[in-house]
Image (cartoon, rainbow, N blue to C red):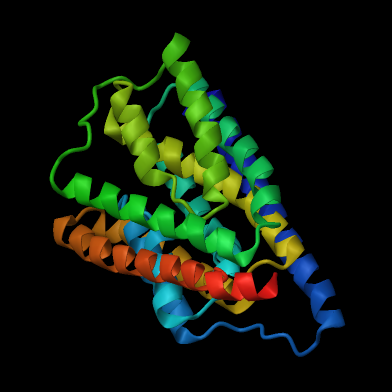
Amino acid sequence: MSVATIALLGALLLLAGWFVFRWWTIEKARRLQHPGRPLWPNGEDCAVGFVTNFFDALGIGNFAPTTAYFKLRNRVPDENIPGTLNAGHTLAVVVEALVFISAVTVDALTLVSMIVAAVVGAWLGVGVVARLPRRAIQLGMGVALIVAGGLFAAKNVDWLPGGGAALGLEGGRLIFAIAVSFLLGALMMLGIGLYAPCLILVSLLGMSPLAAFPIMMGSCAFLMPVGGERFIRTGRYNLPAALGLTLGGIPGVLMAVFIVKSMPMVWLRWLVVCVVVYAALMMLRSALAAQPQPEAVRSSQ
């Protein structure tokens, strides 16, 4: 491994350690103020963490399926879903990133610059999302789930670009990739997964699809502790559900990476399309139901 790769892995380990420390200290102080606050996850949370992160390590992504579960089971209030996703999936994604950054060779400048841009976007984006009202988050996540379902469907029918063989970018292409990575990092804080858009981005720019794995997983692994910590600090997340995603997610990643490695994914993607689109419609329905009726508006005037 190059010096840059070793430094990146070291920085990621330090960031993960900081995230665990901050999570523990914030919740310890919060529990002193609210001793009756629910803490432990249930078995269903852990199972969802295992399954979604198992397939995340194989390239499916974990945000859209987890959001669908939360919505269908009414497990987490809609406004707390983005924070729960970012806090709960952080450590599993860190494990993924450690594996793929060390195993797949990517140009160091491309890898580091795109990761940094995504982290900055997430840091700025989380401050906005943490203050958004419930209906705005419902609308945003509903649209995001529709987009995610469309991307899954496009992948199934081979509409996504196949990519080239390059392992790095330069010049205008690199600048464009950095700008898009910044935007994707900000959108991650709304619960919009980064994997599929990042894969499309690097493929359109002529890079090998394999090179997308350390970029997209590294970006998420660096930005999610930053965004997740801010959600934890503001309390805009569900602690038991997030712990369940963490406890189930890490072994799910390890099984996918070291035991299964690859499997036919097309039927699973179609199942995900159906579930995610249904959850999107439910999310949008909740947002529209919260809108004041015209009669009520007129009567209040």
Q: Nearer the viewer, residue 76 or 301?
A: 301
- Tally of numbered discs: 0
The answer to which image quadrant residue 82 occupies is bottom right
**Left or right of 121 on screen, residue 65:** left
Q: Residue at x 39, y 20 (%)?
A: 168
Residue 260, placed above or below residue 187: below
Residue extending farthest to the top is 171
The answer to which image quadrant residue 105 occupies is top left
Instruction: Locate residue 223, reporting x and y percent.
Output: 59, 45
**Left or right of 103 on screen, residue 32:** right
Q: Residue at x 47, y 81 (%)?
A: 74
Residue extending farthest to the bottom is 36
Q: Nearer the viewer, residue 94 or 119?
A: 119
Instruction: Locate residue 118, reporting x and y percent.
Output: 56, 36
Instruction: Locate residue 135, reporting x and y percent.
Output: 57, 64
Residue 65, placed above or below residue 16: below
Q: Nearer the viewer, residue 213 or 176?
A: 176
- Mark yes or no: residue 122 visible: yes
**Left or right of 205 on screen, residue 90:** right
Quarter of the C terminus within the rendering: bottom right
Q: Residue at x 46, y 77 (%)?
A: 46
Residue 189, placed above or below residue 162: below
